[in-house]
Amino acid sequence: MPMLLPPALGLFLDLLRCPTCHTRRLYSDRGALRCLTGHTFDIARHGYASLLTGTRATSGDDVAMVQARDRFLATGGYAPILQAVTRLAADAVPERGTVVDIGCGTGYYLAGVLDHLPGARGLGMDTSARALRSAARAHERAAAATWDVFRPFPLADEVADVVLDVFAPRNPAEFHRVLRPAGRLIVVRPTDRHLVELRGRVPAMVTIDPAKEQRLHRALDPYFTVTVTEQVEYPMALVGLEALDLVGMTPSARHVNRADLSDDGLLPDQVTVSVLATAYQPRRPRVGACAC
């Protein structure tokens, strides 16, 4: 029996464009998405659209990372970050607006934003099919699709009111192309104090580039101007296996043996959460082309 079109994905058919043709619209046909040229993209039984073809830049989070992320985010440990993202998004989204989350992972931030925007629809894109299984179920108005941030997005021009980029790679030119003139890009990234206690005890933890802010500014400045920046910083207690999950949900998990982390005293029982959340406004007129 053909896979039925998930209702949330149906909300986005008017905005999606064929990843191969780039200009033709997609339509639903017998459990797949197609364009008039004949290019076909499956809808996974878990509810997300498989738009990404060919070699991927990365396979994204694996099963263990997704499970660790789900468990940790369910504790509410990053709720203050979500609250900041929601505040920054609220002013830019009209009553029936559109939110696109790039590198959405399990859909935690997208679902949280949609909870506060009753008329909005959301689309989460990520390379990890495992993460998208969760993202496709994260919210009734959130669709999900496989995609690589470094390729031209399968979206029409100027269709998004907000683009979210939370702890994810960035494609400034494509962010600019898909945002409406009055839209907002919201970028969340760690400061050098973020999880410093963990990085001090676990040598294999991925470090934070001290030039990160300068690189971010250089990349975004041709396309965006800063509207407002919030710093979110607070101490977070870690109970039980939460420290293991916090390590396990990050890219550091690929370099750390979970069994080694179980040694008594290695992991802290409290860490510092420290991030910057910035809302950007698109510059006009357009500049440049897709950074792909």
Image (cartoon, grey):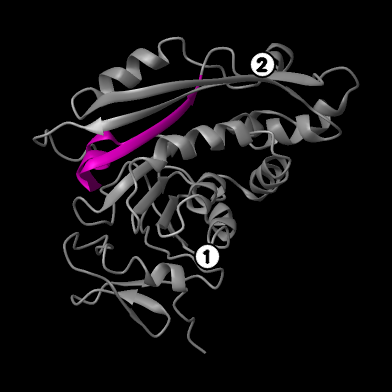
Which amino acid, by three-letter code, is at mark 2? Arg
Q: Is residue 186 magenta?
A: yes
> Tag 1's secondary structure?
loop
Separation of residues labelled 1 and 2 (CA atoms) = 37 Å
Residue at 49 percent of width and 49 percent of height: 110
Provide the secondary structure element on which disc 2 rests: helix
Q: State the residue in front, 171 or 91.
A: 91
> Is residue 177 visible from the viewing direction of this image?
yes
- x 69%, y 46%: residue: 64
Outermost residue, left side:
285
Q: Which mark is residue 140?
A: 1
Return the mark for residue 256.
none
Type of amino acid under label 1: Glu
Horizontal and vertical percent position of residue 34: 29, 75
Q: Against 79, is 2 above or below?
A: below
Residue drawn at the location 44% of the way across and 77% of the way down: 5
Q: Is residue 267 left or right of residue 247?
A: right
Compared with 238, 86 (above or below) is below
* Crowding at mark 2 (Cα within 10 Å: few <14, some 14-19, many 20+): some
Q: Which residues are magenta?
A: 171-190
Position of residue 248 measured from the top left corner of the image (x, y, whole percent): 69, 35
- The residue where tag 2 is placed is 199
Residue 161 x/y as whole percent: 30, 47
Pointer 1 local density, CA inside 10 Å: few below 14, some 14–19, many at least 20: some
The residue under the point 48% across, 53% down is 114
Which residue ends up furthest to the bottom in the rendered image?
1
Residue 147 belongs to magenta span: no
